[in-house]
Image (cartoon, rainbow, N blue to C red):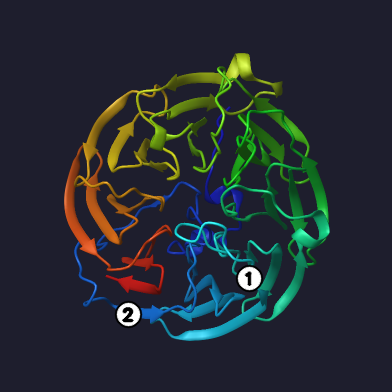
Amino acid sequence: MGFIIGTLLFSTSFLLFAENWPSWRGPSYSGSRTGENYPTQWSADKVTWKVELSGKGASSPVVWKNRIFLTAPAEGVDTALAFDLDGKEIWKTEFGAETKAKHMKLGTSSNASPVTDGKGVFVYFKSGTFAALEMDGTIRWKRNLAEEFGRQDLYWDQGSSPVIIGDLVILPRLHAGDSWVAGFEKSTGKIRWKQERNFEVPAENDNGYTTPIPILHGDRNALLVWCSDHLTAYAADNGSLLWTCAGFNPKGKKLWPPIATPVVAGDIAVVPVGRDDRKQAEVHAVRLGGKGEVTQTHRVWDHSDFGVFVTSPIEYEGKVYLLRHKGEVVCFDPKTGKPFWTAKLPKSLIPYYASPVIAGGIFYASREDGLVFSARVGESFELLGENDMGEQILATPVPFDGKLLVRTSKSLICVD
């Protein structure tokens, strides 16, 4: 029995409007999309449009039909914004004072990306504000999870983004405290289910920055959550635990916070483990399905020859791509873990914190110092462009309709 991730999990409108990019990792949560004629070379002074943003954020924009949605700490206030496809601001909704980032160079108060189903927009901020907006920017509901459940105790700044499955918006709250994953009703914000997720693990390994991945478990909507050295699957309708897999950290290494989100390729979940910045990175594979404890039955392979730290992997046309901390790109077979090829972006001491994306066979990698590299990938790797945006980049770029949205520390930029 196969397990499929993608547009089947969502409303048929995803099929009707193929250029939507409604969530952080795109319409299929794979970090990729098909298409053609995506840009490869441009310069900071010759872009389609550029909008200055008031406040530094690391969240990525999302796109639905003719609207772009984004969060930002505008002048110190948690804010959601909507733009048209020409960069004109349509509306701006404010929620309250931001909670300042703990790590000013890399952290922000607006790290979680919005998610939309075309009927509403859902946003989450470090302050604990979790809210739903109508498509015209009016607030449908708002609650503050920090006030309700206490401050999220994370070493770095909050990072998990909400996802939509059916009539629920799912949000994890994984930290060095009472951790859980919950399903909130899209219409009211009421918690329909809340599943505790507390494992005894080495220091900081329970600090979760990953985003849930929607999957199908047989014919049932479900979601994967990676944190605390465990990969778990929950039923989307009631939060019941379907299965759990361990064995990712047999030596009990500490200070391995899960930041990179796994990716699903067919019936395989590819799970980044450890820290590439400390040369302790690994990649593991788990077969979806099963029931209860599947550690001994569903682990497929693991490799310590390559891995990542912050950047999430991509699935594209049956292959998985990793962008390593200092610019090495690895393309491998998700069934075996065997690399098809490795390549290196131009050498630099500057690392990559924004996750890469692939659009129409073009791989985009944004380095922290503002360089966006483009390369043709597939059977091989061909570097095509080195584009200097002139501003720090922490957010994942967004491809849509032959264009690319790049969010820098100061601006939202569109290139084509």
Residue at the (38%, 24%) spot, across then down? 337
Q: Position of residue 157 (x, y in %)?
A: 57, 54
Secondary-structure class at tag 2: strand
Task: Report the Cα–Cα distance between label 2 and label 1.
Answer: 28 Å
Mark 1 surroundings within 10 Å by alpha-carbon count, few (fewer than 14), some (14 through 19), many (20 or more): many
Tell me if residue 300 comes above or below residue 82 in the rendering.
above
According to the image, label 1 marks what residue?
98
Residue at the (58%, 27%) spot, across then down? 1
The image quarter in which residue 41 lies: bottom left
* Amino acid on which disc 2 is placed: Trp
According to the image, label 2 marks what residue?
49
Instruction: Return the residue nearer the eye: 159 or 201.
Output: 201
Residue, far top: 296
Tell me if residue 22 comes above or below residue 301 in the rendering.
below
Instruction: Name the image quarter holding the C terminus.
Output: bottom left
Residue at the (80%, 62%) spot, across then down? 147
Whether residue 29 can be seen here: yes
Left or right position of 142 against 208? right
Tell me if residue 252 comes above or below residue 328 in the rendering.
above
Mark 2 surroundings within 10 Å by alpha-carbon count, few (fewer than 14), some (14 through 19), many (20 or more): some
Q: Position of residue 87 (x, y in %)?
A: 40, 81
Whether residue 401 can be seen here: no
Specify the label residue 263 is tagged with: none
Secondary-structure class at tag 1: loop
* Amino acid on which disc 1 is placed: Glu
Instruction: Return the residue nearer the eye: 213 or 346.
Output: 346
Q: Which comes before the other along the chain, label 2 or label 1?
A: 2
The image quarter in which residue 293 lies: top right
Q: Are marks 2 and 1 in contact (CB under 8 Å)?
A: no
Left or right position of 43 against 305? left
The image quarter in which residue 226 lies: top right
